[in-house]
Image (cartoon, rainbow, N blue to C red):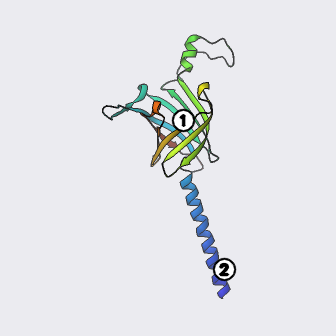
Amino acid sequence: MKKHKILVLFLIGSLSVGCNQETEQKELNKFTGLWSLHVMEEQNPETGEWSEWRDGMQGYILYDDKDNMSVHLTTSGYEDTDLQFPIFTDTISIEALKHLTNSYTYFAKYTIDEKQNVVEHARISHSNPAEWNVPVRRKFTFSGDTLTLQPLEEETSGLRLKWVKIESKNE
């Protein structure tokens, strides 16, 4: 009888450790998934008030569970154009080239510093060649289904991006 009690206690302990590990894993992977940009804001340095940046932006950010991430930002209504964009050719109009500058994309490996609430994106490619292999850091907070990222680099430190999680069919 004593052996059965020990076995039962061992199984209960193993299950609770497994559940705790799964809970910890979910906590560590709060970033994982696809997020849609809700609003991109700029803070007025004099008043501290936030207002929508550049008459609105749209986009997505994706974090996977293997430390990869990507982001694509565009001006609002970017996709609503009749401009033609030939693929990999040098015969593109100046107007189309100007339109393309309203699209911002990069891919990166990410790491999370839970103590400082900072996520680092070690960029591996970028729509701007000067930004390839340049890491960036973002202060983060979570509130329900919203992820807020604030760049820590001086040139973009007055921005705040709020992302809303897009639930997958498997969640």
Q: Position of residue 30 (x, y in %)?
A: 53, 50
Q: Position of residue 80 (x, y in %)?
A: 52, 21
In the image as oriented, which residue stretches furthest toward the front?
154
Q: Is residue 82 something that shows in the picture?
A: no
Dot 2: few (<14), some (14–19), or many (≥20) neighbours within 10 Å? few
Give me the C-alpha separation between circle 2 and circle 1: 49 Å
In the image as oriented, which residue stretches furthest toward the bottom?
1
Q: Position of residue 6 (x, y in %)?
A: 64, 82
In which quadrant of the rendered image does the N terminus lie? bottom right
Q: Position of residue 115 (x, y in %)?
A: 49, 52
Secondary element at tag 2: helix
- The amino acid sitting under disc 2 is Leu
In the image as oriented, which residue stretches furthest toward the right?
88
Of residues 91 and 171, the one drawn nearer to the viewer in this rendering = 91
The residue that mark 2 highlights is: 7
Q: Quadrant of residue 61?
A: top right
Q: Is residue 75 left or right of residue 3?
A: left
Whether tag 2 and tag 1 are in contact, CB under 8 A, the answer is: no
Q: Residue at x 63, y 83 (%)?
A: 5
Of residues 103 and 86, the one drawn nearer to the viewer in this rendering = 103
Can you tell which mark lies on residue 14? Answer: none
The residue that mark 1 highlights is: 60
Q: Is residue 113 something that shows in the picture?
A: yes
Q: Residue at x 66, y 83 (%)?
A: 4
- The amino acid sitting under disc 1 is Tyr
Q: Is residue 25 above or below residue 38?
A: below
Q: Residue at x 54, y 45 (%)?
A: 167
